[in-house]
Amino acid sequence: MKVLIVYYSTYGNTYKMALEIAEGVKLVAGAEPVIRTVPELIPEEIISSREDIRKGKEMQKHIPLVSLEDFREAGAIAFGTPTRFGVVSAQLKNQIDKLTPLWFERALEGKPAGIFVSTSTPHGGQEMTIFSLLPAILHLGMIFVGVPYSVKELFYTKGGGSPYGPGHVAGTDNVREIDEEEKAILRAFGKRLAEIGLKLQKT
């Protein structure tokens, strides 16, 4: 079963989160992570003028753009986004708006889905961003998956992560690396999403 990890990342932080989720998926026999990104909307002249953005784009240039077929083939889906003023990034929302054909087909109904987010600050809107994307998941007929408190790192993480989904605090300069607690939550999320996807396929 394929677990689609589709994300948007400006500086590379959400991309690194996707890699950790993929490691969690790999822990489940019969599950295969598929990492995809979405089209960029930032004008090229802005990207070329910013070294930090150029560096972020360079590290993920090998990641293919997601297709509708990727969504069709997936048994479970993780959506990743940085927060933008407390809501999902325009780039990921743009991709979700393109899922209308799959909505008509009911192709995503019954598939488990979760959300992971990155912010610059601890109170930068991680949970609000997840909630801003949740209606789309429910409208598509998907089954929302979070992170239970059996993942003990939720109790003492100083970075990101909540029962609603994994998170990462990248810092105001966007260079803070994923810490061990965040990493554990991300991997547990990937593992759980894969396990639930496989169970649902058997029903």
Image (tube, rainbow, N blue to C red):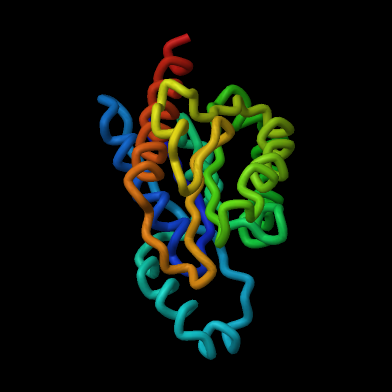
Q: Nearer the viewer, residue 107 or 147?
A: 147
Left or right: 3 in relation to 106: left
Q: Position of residue 195 (x, y in %)?
A: 39, 22
Left or right: 34 in relation to 167: left
Q: Say which residue appears at 59% left-offset and 85% top-offset.
A: 46
Give the vertical position of 167 relative to 201 (above or below).
below
Q: How many marks?
A: 0
Q: Position of residue 84 (x, y in %)?
A: 67, 60
User: Quarter of the image containing the N terminus?
Assistant: top left
Left or right: 180 in relation to 6: left
Q: Where, by quadrant of the figure, is residue 28 drawn?
A: top left
Give the vertical position of 110 relative to 87 (above or below).
above
Q: Nearer the viewer, residue 198 or 169?
A: 169
Q: Say which residue appears at 50% left-offset and 37% top-offset.
A: 77
Q: Position of residue 146 (x, y in %)?
A: 54, 29
Q: Say which residue appears at 73% left-offset and 33% top-offset.
A: 139
Q: Say which residue appears at 63% left-offset and 81% top-offset.
A: 43
Give the vertical position of 91 relative to 34 (above or below).
below
Q: Position of residue 36 (x, y in %)?
A: 45, 53
